[in-house]
Amino acid sequence: MENKKLAIASDHAGYGLKNFLADHFRKLGYEVTDLGTDSEKSCDYPVFAEKLADFIISGGADLGILCCGTGIGMSIAANKVPGIRAAACSDTFSAKYTRLHNDANVLCLGARVVGEGLAAELADIFVTTGFEGGKHARRVGLITGIEKREK
Ligand code: RB5
């Protein structure tokens, strides 16, 4: 189990899926930090995206999972934090290759897009797949350069 420490967060739309996945990974022996939200009461997804992104960057977890309605708002918000590479995925190929080629460190899932079964499969693939490195490391380095506005 390479990425043993996980962090997870959601807004109200992703609340049920977040709890399901937290439970799923705890049963598999992962250490899971749940950063909220704590109910289905309407809340703002950027708040939770930033909270999880900061937690990942500070070394609190190896990888993160964010759940909202589509997965897209969470990914847009999380990607504003330097060092975060968040990918919204709803197919297994993308979940695998965003780890292999992009070294994505946050998976974003849409609870209104995927069911619990597919979400668990996507998350399992994401957390058990490693970064391929090589030419992909150079490209990820170029992404880091964009964050710093290097030319
Ligand atoms: C909430 O209604 C919804 O907008 C949010 O969960 C997410 O899908 C945003 O991208």
Image (cartoon, rainbow, N blue to C red):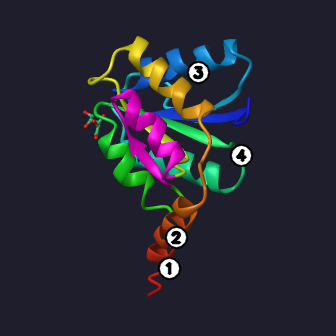
User: Which badge, 3 or 1, comes first in the chain's sequence?
Assistant: 3
Q: CB under 8 Å between callouts 4 and 2? A: no
Determine which residue is flagged by label 3.
22
Q: Looking at the picture, how far across and down is residue 146, in whole percent?
A: 44, 75
Residue 122 falls in image quadrant:
top left
Q: Is residue 9 above or below residue 79?
A: above
Marks 1 and 4 sit apart, C-alpha to C-alpha, by: 23 Å
Amino acid at dot 2: Thr
Amino acid at dot 3: Ala
User: Which badge, 3 or 4, comes first in the chain's sequence?
Assistant: 3
In this picture, residue 74 sits left or right of residue 128 = left
Residue 100 part of the magenta-drawn span: yes
Secondary structure found at label 2: helix
Q: Is residue 82 above or below residue 86?
A: below
Q: Nearer the viewer, residue 78 or 101?
A: 101
Q: Nearer the viewer, mark 3 or mark 1?
A: 1
Q: Nearer the viewer, residue 49 or 113?
A: 113
In this picture, residue 72 sits left or right of residue 127 = left
Q: CB under 8 Å between callouts 1 and 2? A: yes
Indicate which quadrant contains ligand 1: top left
Q: CB under 8 Å between callouts 3 and 4? A: no
Determine which residue is flagged by label 2.
144
In this picture, residue 15 sits left or right of residue 42 = right
